[in-house]
Amino acid sequence: MCDSNSNVVNEKLDPQLPSPDLYAKLIASTGEDLSRPGLLDTPTRASKAFGYLTQGYHQTLQEVSNNAVFPTDNSELVLVHNIEFYSLCEHHLLPFHGVAHVGYLPDGKVLGLSKIARIIDMYARRLQIQENLTKQVAEAISEITDCRGVAVVMDASHMCMMMRGVSKQLSSTRTTSMLGEFETNMQVRNEFLASVPASKIF
């Protein structure tokens, strides 16, 4: 059962959040009774939820990385696998969720591991398509580390394909973005791709 927190309507709303009135009108358009107990606070809760799911618009790369870039003598491939993410499809406002696999080749600097996950979250918490999300994550890591190359693979399931339309429950989508040596050196690219586990997203 969802958390219904009956006090939520009394909390001060962030001015950046969409108006609860928008959600009230949307619910009313279905013919529902907004005065029934289960829906009394739903417009406010929905407003807050949407604000959380799109908070990436109010974050910057500098904020989420928080200067966590450190000197290193290592020049070998750094890999981080199975970073969970969720986002909202910009076409239907329905969720898609999955895992990201990230690799980069340091050039004198490494990025704190948790910051890779935070960068993914920042871009995922916007209205997205998976192709753009993958590219944005790769470009951000490249920008902040000045590395020799970045590779990002994302596997995700899309509710817009599962809940509506073709209604394919077992489908998943894989997208890639290769920058620097991952784009130009097939040996480096293949080393990374060989390390990426098979998709298990449903």
Image (tube, helix red, strand yellow):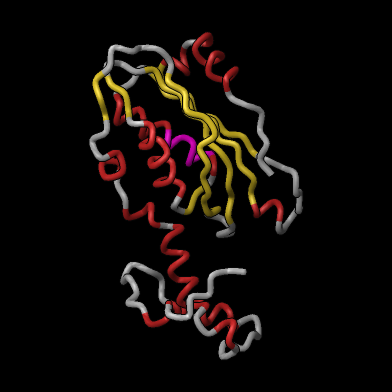
132 in the magenta segment: yes
Could you tell me what secondary structure mostly forms the magenta stretch? helix
Residue 179 in sight from this viewpoint: no
Q: Percent from the top left, x then y, of residue 122? A: 39, 47
Q: Is residue 199 left or right of residue 102?
A: right
**Residue 16 falls in image quadrant:** bottom left
Q: In the rendered view, would you say 123 is above or below 94?
A: above
Q: Is residue 150 visible?
A: yes
Q: Residue 82 is drawn in which quadrant?
A: top right
The stretch drawn in magenta includes residue 77: no
Q: Quadrant of the image for the N terminus?
A: bottom right
Residue drawn at x 28%, y 12% is: 73
Q: Identify the residue at horizontal 31%, vertical 50% (top origin).
A: 59
Side (left or right) of 94 relative to 167: left
Depth check: 187 or 40 in front?
40
The magenta segment? 131-137
Q: Residue at x 27, y 33 (%)?
A: 68
Residue drawn at (38%, 82%) of the image = 10
**53 over 145 or under it: above or below:** below
**Image spot of residue 131 (x, y percent):** 53, 39
Q: Residue furthest bottom?
A: 35
Residue 28 against residue 161 in the figure, above or below: below
Residue 42 percent location from the top left of the image: 52, 77
